[in-house]
Image (tube, grey):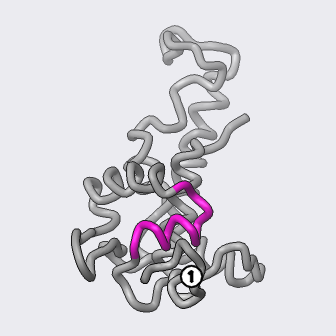
Amino acid sequence: MISVSHTTSHAIRALACLAGCADPPASIKDVAACADVPQAYLAKIVKKLNDSGIIESKRGHKGGIWLARPAKLISLLEICIALEGDDFLGTCLLGSECCSDDRDCPTHQFWMKNRELIRREFDRIKLSDVLAFYRERGLHHMPTVEELAGSGLPFASE
């Protein structure tokens, strides 16, 4: 099955929560609750996203995380590369470590063509598109960070 890693999937949901945040910065605790991602796991993801320039952060009182650029300028490709590296789709569909143009496998030509199509599509799809998708579909399992903070639930910011 071809898919992004669980880490990247969690990151995309968390970043969509940040994109919908009306009053940044947001706490990692609230973003984790919004995206339904374990807080400790999200903290590790946040470090990579911060190092790659996708988000910015500030520690301490009134600190938190926020998008470094508008969501319409952050692509899924950029997120995948930040978390999994430039070759996140792999070089061989069958997982061969020695597959290349000189030493190909039965799926080599197919994968070279379609891997590039996937990369282009991931570059076309922006974080703002992900947020719009959730909002258009009325997926209420992703409450906004502000809703969580004002809900009085134990995971909300005090």
Up/down of 158 relative to 33, above or below: below
Front residue of this view, candidates 81 and 149:
149
| The magenta stretch spans residue 35 | yes
Name the residue located 73 percent from the left edge and 83 percent from the top edge: 136
| x then y, percent, for residue 88 | 48, 38
| x then y, percent, for residue 123 | 49, 59
Front residue of this view, candidates 147 and 87:
147
Q: Quadrant of residue 131?
A: bottom right
What residue range appears in magenta?
27-38
Front residue of this view, candidates 56 and 53:
56
Badge 1: residue crowd in 10 Å (few <14, some 14–19, many ≥20): many
Front residue of this view, candidates 48 and 28:
28
Q: Main secondary structure of the magenta part?
A: helix
| The magenta stretch spans residue 122 | no
Q: Which residue is mark 1?
A: 148
Up/down of 124 relative to 115, above or below: below
Which of the image's four quarters has the N terminus? top right
Left/right of residue 130 with respect to residue 100 in the rendered view: right
Name the residue located 39 percent from the left edge and 55 percent from the top edge: 43
| x then y, percent, for residue 102 | 48, 11
Name the residue located 35 percent from the left edge and 75 percent from the top edge: 66
